[in-house]
Image (tube, rainbow, N blue to C red):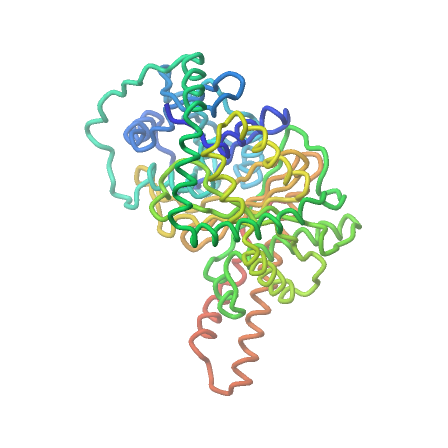
Amino acid sequence: MDRMSPLDAAFLEAEDEEPTTSMGIASVAVFEGSPPRHEELLSAFESRLPLIPRYRQKVVSPLWDLGPPVWVDDPAFDLSFHVRRTALPAPGSERELFALMARLMAQRLDRSRPMWEVWVVEGLQDDKWAMVSKVHHCMVDGVSGTQIYHLLLSASPDEKLPEDLPEPWHPATPPSRALVTADAVRELATSPLRLAALVGDALRAPRDSAGRAADVIRGAVALSFNARPAKASTLIGEVGRQRRYAAVSASLRQVKAVCETYGVTVNDVALTAATAAFRSLLLARGEPCNPNTVRSLVPVSVRARGDEGILDNRVSCLLADLPVHVREPVDRLRAVHAHLAHLKTLKEAEAGAAVNDLATREPFVFVAPLVRIAFRLPQRNIVTVTTNVPGPRDALYLLGRRMVRLLPYVPIASRVRIGVAILSYCDELTFGVTGDYDTADVGLLSREISRALDELLAEAERTSADRETRDGRGVDPAAHRLQVAAMDHGDLRRGVAQ
């Protein structure tokens, strides 16, 4: 049996407490050419399933929260249940693709089976097809979810299916719920020994332990200041079952040109574009844009080197107030950059990571209620989620078809009506906007994200030109790169839902 961490379990239990919530995360991969035959696709997945054992496991929970849920082999595993096929209505544009994505993600995954699905989508315009990969958040976070593409797809268009499929899979006999509960009782009995070992490790390195404790205390204090409820606005409130989805993509090369000009990161530019979109939405609704109007949960990966391929959640967070009150694009970018740098000095992410780590060592029966409170509290004190995950840098292929785009999806829960996921792939940075069906204008947000990126690029061009004139030294290499990036400036806006 493989036990869930308290954080993994919290994502699972979020659905129990929120009947309108589906905690599936997803992405849409768009491929060139015609889709493969279904039998061919099933064979491709079957050949790679040994690399992802979790895809053939289901969840069993002990009684009375005596221990965390555990992963066990599913003896009734049926690959054809998880790999499905559908088609878009004409004309097969992004509008139809985004509508399908919203409908698929509003549906909860079946907990009696391994909690993942893949939908092959036919009928896209321009001789393309798509693959929607949906998996429950209790299995993966953004980083490990993206790593699945490296396991399922190949780096070469010439890779062929193996002539011989893997040996037949023989599932281990799954334990009954009574046995899982008994195992949880045994773990509970030995928890004092694990706690004693933890204390012993700390005493053997007192200086390091003291430094980590100071960081945790500093971060906990900073997080406590953000425990106040979010300011009332139409961005938060009751959330229904149905979703809307839109996506927009930009040239990563152009975004990096902006980064070079102003000495910021890709994440700074991405969050600035999201900030501008929220500002435009508030103004369109006649609502104030104050410094604390849009507080965002910004997930931070705490994976150690070498842990990228492990399927679980290893994230902490920052709670950032997006500067929607700042009018000028470059001033807004500088405000985002300074605010994120300040939050990092407060050690918020370290505090969250320490709590998660400690929770894994404590008896789950005591930890579970606290994790639920800790998981739900930010949902009352934030307005949105903005998550940025680095995706594959090189092109990937499935059965010889090149993946040309990769669009992310982040779930929303509790009172959070809008979420923004940001994912890079090759030379493209894509924003996926999730919204409550009745209250979120995802089309406006995606258009404004695109417009904000255009504004930042235009400002970067002017800044670079001014520097050239001021220095009087002709075109320097950085400015030349910016001018080259600007040549396809008109192509920056792609995939905006109407």
Using residue 320 as the reference point, say whether residue 58 is left or right of it.
left
Q: In terms of image quadrants, where is residue 177?
A: top left
Q: Residue at 49% x, 66% y: name it.
A: 257
Instruction: State the image coordinates of residue 425 (x, y, percent, origin top left).
Output: 43, 50
Q: Residue at 44% x, 30% y: name it.
A: 192
Q: Which of 340 and 82 is in front in this view?
A: 340
Using residue 122 as the reference point, say whether residue 229 is left or right of it.
right
Instruction: State the image coordinates of residue 171 (x, y, percent, origin top left).
Output: 31, 18
Please state, as top left, top right, bottom left or bottom right, where the N terminus lies in the image: top left
Residue at the extreme left: 163
Using the image, determine if residue 97 lies above or below residue 340. Answer: above
Q: In this view of the protein, can residue 422 be seen by the observer?
A: no
Q: Nearer the viewer, residue 248 or 222?
A: 222
Q: Residue at 50% x, 61% y: name it.
A: 265
Residue at the extreme bottom: 472
Q: In terms of image quadrants, where is residue 16?
A: top right
Q: Residue at 52% x, 56% y: name it.
A: 267
Q: In this view of the protein, can residue 83 be seen by the observer?
A: yes
Q: Which of 479 and 58 is in front in this view?
A: 58
Using the image, determine if residue 296 lies above or below residue 100. Answer: below
Instruction: State the image coordinates of residue 135 (x, y, percent, origin top left).
Output: 46, 31
Total marks shown come to: 0
Using residue 5 as the reference point, say whether residue 78 is left or right of it.
left
Instruction: State the image coordinates of residue 444 (x, y, percent, origin top left).
Output: 66, 48
Please state, as top left, top right, bottom left or bottom right, where the C terminus lies in the image: top right
